[in-house]
Amino acid sequence: MDFELSDELSSLRQTVRRLAQEKIKPRAREIDMTGAYPQDLFDEFKKADLLGLCIPEEYGGSSAGIMGLTLAIEEVTKYSNVLGLMLLLTRLPTGPIMIAGTEEQKLRYLPGIANGTQRAAFCLSEPGAGSDVAGMQTRVVEDPDVTGGFLLSGTKCWISGGMQADWFVVFAKTGDPASRLHTGIGAFIVHADAAGLTRPRVDKKMGVRGIDTAEIVFADVKVAPNQVIGGGFALVMQSLNAMRPIVAARGLGLAEGALMYAVDYVKSRAAFGKTIAEFQGIQWEIAKCATEIEAARLLTYRAAALADEGKFTKEYVPMLSMCKYYASEVAVKASGLAVQLLGAAGYMEEHPVELYYRDAAQLRIVEGTSQIQLSLIAKGVLGHDLWWD
Ligand SMILES: Cc1cc2nc3c(=O)[nH]c(=O)nc-3n(C[C@H](O)[C@H](O)[C@H](O)COP(=O)(O)OP(=O)(O)OC[C@H]3O[C@@H](n4cnc5c(N)ncnc54)[C@H](O)[C@@H]3O)c2cc1C
């Protein structure tokens, strides 16, 4: 058992930490206020070669793996959850292609993400089916004009990066939309400029402003045979399982950022003739939060290592879910504590902690809510998949 990062990963972490402090930290509040997509920071990621961290070298990436991306996202999210999301979006839609795509699809779609000439989004959720993936109604039917091709119809919602995406990975039912058969779901690549695809609505959000979530509507959109990934419900789950440490990294980084800020504040804020950092009641809250952050880090890094080793079978699923569940909850708790430690100042826009708090709430919802993660963990315990005997 080795708790040290390799030299490459330590150096990656240092590089991203510097970039986050110099370029991202000064911009975070403005991005939240304007809600404008931070193209300049996308360009910084591109320049620093951070858009292909999780993409193998043979497809234009740097093969830093899920662990590399996890570390980078943690550093970035210490200052901005939006920029953490920007990096996350290099993996979420490329995942199904890396897992189940053809060689031709990998060569066609992955290099553009790695070199920053393309962006993509992941379309799973629907107005009537979020947690209940098998309840999706988006469907494909065979294209009568193209052998092996399909026509895709349906509505996807809350799609992160939906307005910027050049292409989408879309999950749809391949048979009767009312069927809950796990084999009756497939993944398809759809180009943003395809006829029949529209993006009619952008959501007004409580946080993570700067990367839109959008509604994407598909009306008989043609999907060519070479845009079919296939996969079934198992591909949905493996794609999401590989993402657990990457989402958790946002929670971890956000919690660290919030606590670091609050600690600096309490050391300078005076009350009752001393700094509030000198009160034991305050110190204990800080100590408990720091302990929870370290626990979240261990769960997250281990999950990233498991994911990089391709360990997705049922005995590993609870461990992947634990990191996402716990780091998201710690993010909400740490940012809530930070608001409290700053008192009225924490409630105001002059300080970033209210922004951390609003941004953290998203993490308990996306890519499997906390309740869904708890169900997966419980299944592993009740089924004796997890450390039994
Ligand atoms: C900012 C943001 C960005 C997003 N980006 C994307 C994206 O890029 N792509 C995408 O496909 N989706 C995206 N989503 C959607 C997200 O994945 C869904 O919101 C999530 O899966 C939950 O689905 P839902 O909102 O329909 O909640 P519901 O499934 O309706 O759940 C509502 C509540 O009921 C609870 N619940 C549901 N089922 C159970 C159960 N079996 N046991 C216990 N509790 C249960 C949930 O935990 C939740 O608290 C995004 C959402 C947000 C907020």
Image: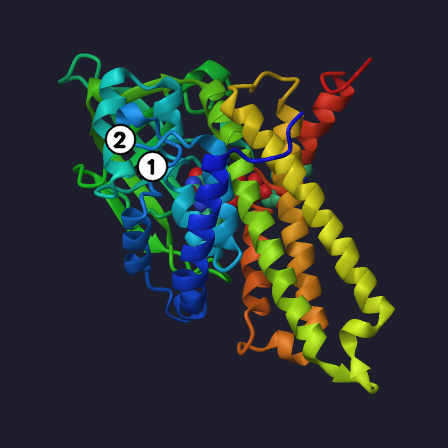
Q: Residue at x 56, y 74 (%)?
A: 351
Question: Helix, strand, or loop for circle 2?
Answer: loop
Are there few (<14), some (14-19), or many (20+) residues within 10 Å of tag 2?
Answer: some
User: Please, is residue 212 above or below residue 191 in the view?
Assistant: below
* Quarter placement of the C terminus: top right
Left or right: 83 as drawn, with respect to 2: left
* Quarter placement of the N terminus: top right
Q: Mark 1 = which residue?
A: 52
Q: Position of residue 379 (x, y in %)?
A: 71, 23
Q: Position of residue 136 (x, y in %)?
A: 45, 31
The front one of 73 and 319 is 73
Q: Residue at x 17, y 41 (%)?
A: 193
User: Please, is residue 312 above or below residue 353 in the view?
Assistant: above
The disc label shown at residue 60, or none: 2
Q: Residue at x 66, y 18 (%)?
A: 315
Left or right: 209 as drawn, with respect to 57: right
Q: Position of residue 165 (x, y in %)?
A: 28, 44
Residue type at mark 2 is Gly
Discs 1, 2 touching: Cβ within 8 Å: yes
